[in-house]
Amino acid sequence: MIKKHDRQKNEKGRNDPRAQAALPIDPAVKARQFQTLRGMKDVFGEDQHRWFLLEKEARRSAEDYGFQWMETPMLEESALFVKTIGRGTDIVDQEMFSFETQGGEKVSLRPENTAAMVRAYIQHGMWTQPQPVKLWYWGPFFRYDRPQAGRLREFHQLGFEVLGDASPLADALLMIQAVELLGSIGITVDVELNSIGCTTCRPTYIEQLTQYYREHRSSICAECKKRLGKNVLRVLDCKERGCERIKAEAPQSVDALCEACKDHFMRLLEYLDERDVPYMLQPTLVRGLDYYTRTVFEIVVREPEAAAASGAAPASKLALAGGGRYDGLVEFLGGRPTPGLGIAFGIERVIHAVRNAASTVPEPVEKRVFVAQLGEAARRSALKLFGKLRQQGIPVAHSFSKDGLKAQLEVANALKVPYTLIVGQKEVLDHTVLIRDMEGGVQEIVAEDRLISELQRRLSELNGVKAVRVPAPPIEPDEPLDPEDIEVL
C-alpha cells in the first residue's frame, strides 16, 4: 500500500527535470547503433602498437635531448588562443570548439599547445629555473576542420618546447632531433625552412608583400582577398592553383632580413650543414600562427627516389611536423622577455607514415656518455660528435646551452654517466677528444678516429664487470691483484 506522502513524492520526482533525465530511454533511440562523431577516430588493433612504439621512441628522444614532460588542461580561456594565434586565422575564426560554461566563462578546447605551455611557464614562475626550460607533451587537440586523410577534428600532437634559449643552435637541435626521431622509426624526411624576420625587419617585408598582392588582386581567390586586408602573410598559405602561380613570384622574406636575423639564419644553416641534415629553403613558408618570429620550418616526408626520377609532377608533400621561433610570445602574455621555439608532430600523420614504412622501434637504453664543449668551434665539433655517437648506438647526453665546463660536468654527474667527452679549442685543432672517467677523475686524450672503438671497449668492460670486491686484508696499491682474489658480483 502506497502512502499519500509517497505518492506526492513520486509525482514531484516525475516533474523534476533531473529525474526526467534519468527516465528510461525511448526504445527507438535505445535500439540505434551509435557511431563516432565526424572527424573522430577510435585507436585499436595494430595501430595501438604503432602508437606505443612512437611514444616510446619520443620519450627516448626527449630524455636524450634533456626535455621534461608537461601536460596542460584540454580546456583554456578562449582569450588565450585568440590573443596568441590571432584573429583572421582559420583556427580562431572557424575551427575552435568554444562554449560558455555554467559560470559564464568563455572557454575553448585547445586547438594547439604552445600558448598553453607559455601560459604555464609564466604562471608557475619557470623563469626562476635554470634556463633553458625544455618541455615536451603528448595529447589530444581539437579543431572543427573538414575531415580528411591525416586531418581529424580530434587529433593528437607530440611537441617539444624550448624556453630561454635564443641561439641558432637551439633551432638546429630541434630540427636534428625531429629528423632523428622520425628516422629511428623508419621514416625518411627533409626539413623545409625559412626566416620571416623579427619586429625590426618584418614590417618592411609585409609592406613589400602587401604592395605586390594589391597589384595582383584580380588574380587571387576570394579568400586571399579577405586575408590581404587582415594578415597578408596568411595569403602565402593558400594552395589554390591560381594563387600558387602568383605566390611563386612574390617577394621573399629572406631578402628583407635585418643583419641580426640574417646572421641567426646563416649560423643555423651552418649547424645543419655540419650534421648533414637534409634541408631545403622554402621562401614562402610562414606557418599558420601569428606568434612566429625568425625561423619557421616543416618536416616533410621525402619524395621516393623512383618518383623523383620519373620526372612526374610532384604531389603535395606530407608534412609530419612543423614549428619555429616565438621570441616575443612570453612577453606578449605578460611574462619577462624570453626567447622560445618549438615543434609539434601530427601523431595521426606520423602513424600513417609508420604504417606505410612497416618499421619497428629499438629498445631505449640508459645514457652512458656525456659530451661537453668549450667555445663556439668546439660546440660545432661536439654537435657533430654527438650525432656520431647516437648513430653508433652509444647512449649519449649533452647540455649544449651551457658554456662553462663546471656546469656541464654537474649535469654529467647528475646523469651518473661513467664517461664525459670534453672538446675544447685545442682538441678541435688537434682532432682529439678528452675522455674523463667520472668516477676516478682520470682523463685521457684520444684521437678522433679511435674514439668510437675506445668508447665501445670501455663500455663493454663496464657491462661485463658490474662490481669488484677484494677480500681482506687490503692489498697495497702497488701490489698486483691475484685473479683468484677477485669476485665478480
Image (cartoon, rainbow, N blue to C red):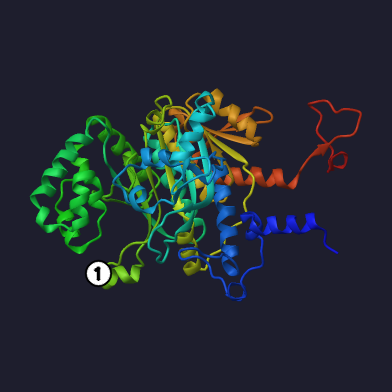
Image quadrant assignment for residue 437:
top right
Placement of 92 over or under 201, stated as above or below: below
Quadrant location of residue 201?
top left
Q: Nearer the viewer, residue 244 or 8?
A: 8
Front residue (pair 279, 273)? 279
Element at badge 1?
loop
Q: Position of residue 46 (x, y in %)?
A: 59, 69
Is residue 8 something one can see in this rendering? Answer: yes
277, 281: nearer the viewer: 281
Give the residue drawn at x 27%, y 34%.
Answer: 198
The residue at 54%/42% (across/down) is: 72
**Residue 240 place in picture, x, y as percent:** 22, 61
Q: Does 295 appear above or below 332?
A: below
Residue type, label 1:
Ala
Residue 152 is drawn in which quadrant?
Answer: bottom left
Task: Point out residue 392 in the picture as x, y percentages from the top left corner.
Answer: 54, 51
Q: Residue at x 10, y 53 (%)?
A: 216
Mark 1 lies on residue: 313
Instruction: Name the image quarter holding the N terminus.
Output: bottom right
